[in-house]
Amino acid sequence: MITLFADVLLPLALPKVYTYRIPLQWNEIAAKFCRVIVPVGKKKRYSGIIWNIHEKAPEGREARYIEAILDESPLLDENHARFWEWMAAYYMCSLGDVMQAALPSGLKLSSETIIHFVESESEHDLSSLSDREILILDALKKIGELNLDDVAKIAGIKTVFPLIKGLVEKNLITTDEELKYAFKPKTEQYIALHPDYANEKALNSVINSLKKAPKQQDCILAFLQDEKNPRINLEPIKRSELLKKNVSTASLSQLIKKGILMLELKTISRLDATNANSTLPELSRAQNIAFSEIIKGVETSKPVLLHGYTGSGKTELYIHLIHEAISAGKQVLYLLPEIALTAQIVRRLRALFGSKVQIYHSKFSENERMEVWQAVEQKSDEGSLIIGARSALFLPFKKLGLIIVDEEHDSSYKQNDPAPRYHARDAALMKAKLYNCPIILGSATPSVESYYNAITNKYHLVGLYERFGGAILPDVIIADLKEATRKQKMKGIFSKLLVDEIENTQKQGKQTILFRNRRGFAPLLECNQCKWVPQCAQCDISLTYHKQAHQLKCHYCGYAIPVVSHCKDCNSGDIRMKGFGTERLEEELSSLLPTLSIGRMDLDTTRSKHGHYKIIEDFQEGRIEVLVGTQMVSKGLDFDHVRLAAVLNADTMLQYPDFRAFERSFQMLSQVCGRAGRRNEPGTALIQTWNPDHPVLEWVKKHDYKSFFTYEIAERKTFGYPPFCRLIHLYVRHENQNTLDEGAELLASLLRTSFGKRVLGPEYPPVGKVRNLFQKNVMIKLEITLSPSKAKSRINETIKHFQSEVTLKGFRIIVDVDPV
């Protein structure tokens, strides 16, 4: 029999796949893209994926055996595997990084350290043990075994390895590795009648025998009673439903103990099973024209860029395209940049497509994500719609018939940490190419790169420049904060003009959205005497004041301390707040206009799974008159009664030191303004600024995307930025600042031997230290005409040379392709 070997991909940041031997008895069942259990190192075991099967033994070592095959059929298909390979190559990460990001935890088994107590004939000497060690031993004697999380909880510490190592060396405990299965199906308890009593004679007999136990008799009669039909019920019913019929838990337990009734566990789905109850929306004249243009674009096999004003009805076009794909038995992927956006769109699409709609994003539990994965894989023959954030790209589609990337310009589509640092829009374009399916990119404010691709005929451009239902674009007012301050027309952080507009909106029974892209109460506290500012202990950033939590928090690493009352340098008690966030905005507005009902939507108020849904529902139903929020409120949301949308401070975006600052500002401001007046009644947008003559504000005021694009594309061409070049950032990190300076300079000089003046830096970014690591940025600008694969290969070689041959150690180098 032939000896076969498998190259196995592991969910680890390793530079290659590793070769294992397939046991002879499994030669027939081992297949590409099936999961297997393999040993790694001395004790660890992982579930990997067979990436290739061949007859070539590894050189220089004896191949270890695969220990188990987990799947009867491949987990991935060829298209899916090619997508992973493309992502690893394009974004310069390992294939294991992609696997780690792509698979839900339920498909990634790994070994877990299990601790056991060592039994001894003579008693152990415990006199030299610490209190924590004694706690662990006591727990082991009672429970029998512990894992690392258990030890951490019992000992009250995070780093448990020194504690475990000490107990092992004292021969008090042993450790071994067991595979940890993450996925747990959802089950529900059902009560069933034992088969011995499933005939009339036996049933009457058992009921009569329970006369001396009336509560048990009532329980069996309640079980047999079918409220929907006047007949005896012999089918299992939910335990919870039976207990609602005035049945006591004790009497039910006794009947189960006697073997009259049985307790059964049934696996149930966590996925929504809503039935469709709506018809397709009718398209307007402008929408019908746009729909025809989209079909023409699809027929050319080009990506379609749908550029439509906010409120123009792009979603109605998506709905008709989805309907056609599902009717043809195809799968549809609908990507959204923010989880907050799913709240409205899911409700609407479920009314149209019922249980064919599934959701996939990070607020779902791992078990729910696992069930969606299984549904996409197992029901590929049925038409379905998956709505999700960027991670939904990795689902195992087999009949992908359409991809929609809504708000395609949004920077939330970019994964920043950990690897792979991919952009979901660009990855979706590649996925559409691999699966040979249409892709629609939609936005009211397209990214400069996408619009450039459209006007240069790489994409098919479709315009939708009428608001749906005859609604008109909002009137944009620029509030000059400098002038308002000079004329003493400011009320705290609000101009009088804005306060008047909010009051008028309330009087009309309408709603307001207030945008401030900074959460917390105040960005920093400052000593008024010596200007000392509380800083994060781990990052080069000031701590943000959160009044509700009464803490100063770092928004980079999560470090938090109680609010300080005195300066740490001069001991002054004159500590003042600088700037404002959404929390302060909410509080000051409540003081100014106490009759208003105000809601806040930011990361702090939406941490729970259904946090977004509750706030959006309250606003939709009119229980909230003013919604204060960060960028979550700025895009994609559609409310009937919003008359006023306001930006509290436009200048922080406009002044940010980045070549995309104007683009991001125009997009964000336009999207916020677009929330107002989306139905028959006109709306108003108000932007507070210290620089009212800024050109971006003029373009926003006129809703003039084309003038903004003309200016921006000329600037990009002059200074050599995307789409006229490709950017690759290398973030060099080290715990010692002097060593970082030396190493970053050396890496940049090594890169210059291959790329010359294309290498810029190294420079410190705006935040020069994060989580106790100092960092510098080296930027590489590559002409479009250069081969990206050859350039990336050369960069990887340079990094390997730097890491292996340079005497300086302890560096982390993060590669970010196409940074945003």
Image: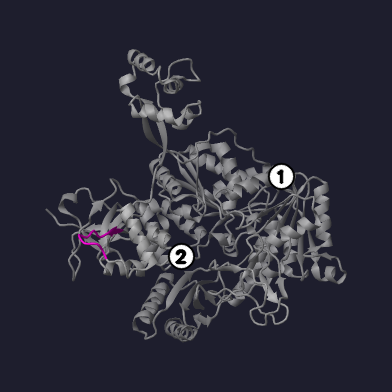
Could you tell me what secondary structure mostly forms the magenta stretch? loop
Residue drawn at 55 percent across, 39 percent down: 350
Quadrant where the C terminus sits is bottom right
Quarter occupied by residue 801: bottom left
Give the numbered dot on residue 623. 1
Q: Residue furthest left?
A: 1
Q: Say what secondary structure mark 2 lies in.
A: loop
* Left or right: 183 in relation to 41: right
Q: Residue furthest top?
A: 201
Amino acid carrying label 1: it is Arg
Mark closest to the chain's N terminus, 2 or 1: 2
Instruction: Where is residue 71? Give x, y as percent.
Output: 29, 48
Quarter occupied by residue 329: top left
Q: Residue 436, relative to residue 19: is it above or below?
A: above
Q: Residue 175, relative to residue 771: is it above or below?
A: above
* Left or right: 461 in relation to 211: right
Residue position for label 2: 418
Give the spatial CA distance, label 2 vs label 1. 39 Å
Amino acid carrying label 2: it is Pro
Magenta segment range? 115-124
Q: Say what secondary structure mark 1 lies in.
A: loop
Please indicate, yes or no, whether residue 326 appears anywhere in the rendered image: yes
Q: Nearer the viewer, residue 723 or 800?
A: 800
Instruction: Where is residue 767? Give x, y as percent.
Output: 57, 75
Instruction: Where is residue 783? Give x, y as percent.
Output: 50, 74
Residue drawn at 37 percent across, 14 percent down: 204
* Left or right: 500 in relation to 9: right
Q: Residues within 10 Å of mark 2 (few under 14, many from 20)?
A: few
